[in-house]
Image (spheres, rainbow, N blue to C red):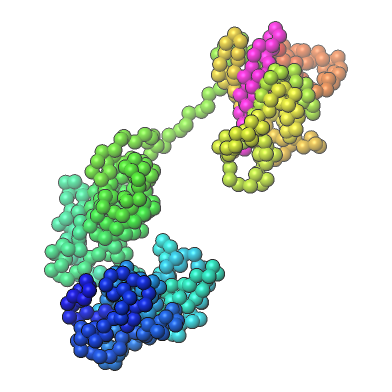
Amino acid sequence: MADSGHYYSEHDDRTAPQFRNRKGRGSHKGRSYDRSRRDRQRGGHSVGFGGPGPRSRLDDIDADVTMSDSSQDNSSQHRFNPYGRPFRKGGDGRFDRDRRQGKGGGGGRGGGFRGGAGNGGGGRSRSGWFKVTIPHGKKYDKKWLLPALQNICTVPYTPVQYHVEHNRVHFYVDESAVATALHKCSHKITDTDGYKVEVHVNPSAPPSFLITELKPEHLEHLRQCMAKRFDGSQQALDLNNIRTDPDLVSQNIEVILNRKTNMEAVIKIIEENIPELTGLNLSNNRIHKLDELTDLVSKAPNLKTLNLSHNELKSDRELDKIKGLKLVELWLNRNPLCDFFKDQASYISSAVRQRFPRLLKLDGHDLPAPIGFDVETPTVIPPCKGSCFGSEEIKVLILRFLAQYYSIYDSGNRQPLLDAYHDGASLSLTTPYTTQNPSRSSLGEYHKDTRNLKRIKDTTMRFRLLKHTRLNVVAFINELPKTQHDIASFNVDVNTFTNTLLSFTVSGVFKEVAVDGKSRESTMAFSRVFVTVPAGNSGLCIVNDQLFIRMATTEEIRRAFVAPAPTPSSSPVPTLTAPQQEMLTAFSQKSGMNLEWSQKCLQDNEWDFNRAAQVFTQLKTDGKIPDVAFIK
């Protein structure tokens, strides 16, 4: 039957307000609704509408429909059906919006409660369970939301399987009286932001954890069905659309793989019968979560091909649950998650390659070969090579420079370093990028001056943190904590060498020294790039200095400060007695070390020549004496 462009069946249960004074669309705009015609259409019933009339609804826009759990009532609510389609598609004004949100009667299908007790439209829940949904419920604390609902709900209840999905909160109840009472709570609670809390209630299947497992005889039929679908030559199992398999349907066995218990049963059969499985097709099974597939990582470790196409996966985050699989072929097409990527490249890189770096085929298409290293086989990283100077001449020049530079740097007065820098020299300090509070780090002292380009984006700040001219460079160096460098830990690599330029990198470890001369517990590592030009007859002058400081590794700490090191000092060398001076000269000649290192070795061994010689021999054999000790 047609009514102004709207078609109703003879048994249509939709209702509409008696008056429509608000601006609307179509031919009903601005005129009264013909109640008698509506009554005739409803099969001759002259009773009123199933819900409160428009007057009461306009007086209280938050009013709820009184709902009955009795299907035998032949009163005015006999024809009420809150599950039919809305009277007007799109609706108009607040009234129709209330119907869509389930605030009142009027037949709004999109309302919050579809599980009421009318005898039309199948409002009852066959299972006796109802699913309660709170739109935007994620922002509410569970400890606030549930008591708030309970306080205004007229029937006590216990929420079952409370969980958050996207922005919504869901839980289940198993009584229609509770469902009706909770439905009436919609828009009755105001949150701290002033918004009304919506409550949607719908008939539902039981919660997944309550769904009974397949019976033993059903499991046997499932095992036989899977055996027929298994291709032994390819070690592949095809479970595409398994719920419609004739062998299962004929036995009235319902296998739905988006149910936890059903998927677990399938994976258990795989584990017990075909653990060497290499290919699995799970397409067309309405799968929306991959929680149970996590077990495939351990139960089917040889799985290389997985087909998840034509399912209901909404987020690529689900793939994180199976990223332990070493897949080379994956099918994801015709899942909602594929619609969230602007192009094929982002789909491949963001959703797939990050999780499955070995993947060669996606949705049937070949992918570019992955770039990476196969590190499955345990390998030992080769030891770090020693210093690389390029020539003996450069080696002598650099080691002499470093001995002089750090002798002053580790002394109490760094001002003499002015002679080491060019007038137009520049220096920058960098520490690793970190999100932790710098004040709690051992590098906190250096953090305020770090010029880490990953952290510092402002160009003005980058320029300010670059120290210019030798006066500013040395003034800045003087402000840094006092240090003791482990010369024996130094590793030098020459980057560039010409007649007019020498660039080299030196790395090693050091400790900070407090005012009382005691070193801090933490050991730090550094890497420093010096760009130098010739100065004088055989000296170097720094034009650019890049200093990087980080915390030392466990291995670096273990090896630090093992070899004897001279105690740097800017003061003159103490006067030796004649016997000591004679012993020092002899030890230097026999060991080949310079006088400074020979004296340190003798002093550490209480000027016992033989004991010092034994210690020297052992340290030299172990390679723990740096090259700088032999420069005379």
Q: From the viewer's perspective, is 552 left or right of 173?
A: right
Measured along the vertical axis of the image, is residue 258 above or below residue 584? below
Horizontal arrangement in the rendering, residue 183 relative to residue 6 (left or right): right
Q: Residue furthest front?
A: 30
Query: Residue drawn 69% across and 19% down?
Result: 424
Which residue occupies the foreground of this view, 201 or 1? 1
Viewport quadrant of the C terminus: top right
Query: Extreme top residue here?
Result: 537
Residue ID at (40%, 37%) = 375
Q: Give above or below for 244 relative to 171.
A: above
Q: Is residue 582 visible?
A: yes
- Nearest the viewer among 514 and 64 is 64
Q: Main secondary structure of the magenta part?
A: strand
Which quadrant holds residue 378? Answer: top left
- Decide: is 369 above or below 26: above
* Residue 610 lies in quadrant: top right
Q: Is residue 585 left or right of residue 242?
A: right
Instruction: Residue at 17%, 77% (x, y): give it.
Output: 1
Q: Which residues are magenta?
A: 524-551
Q: Residue at x 84, y 15 (%)?
A: 579
Left or right, 180 with respect to 396, comes to left
- Please provide percent x and percent y for residue 332: 28, 50
Q: x, y percentage for residue 344?
A: 31, 42
Q: Quadrant of residue 490?
A: top right
**Magenta span contains residue 540:** yes
Closer to us: 592 or 444 = 444
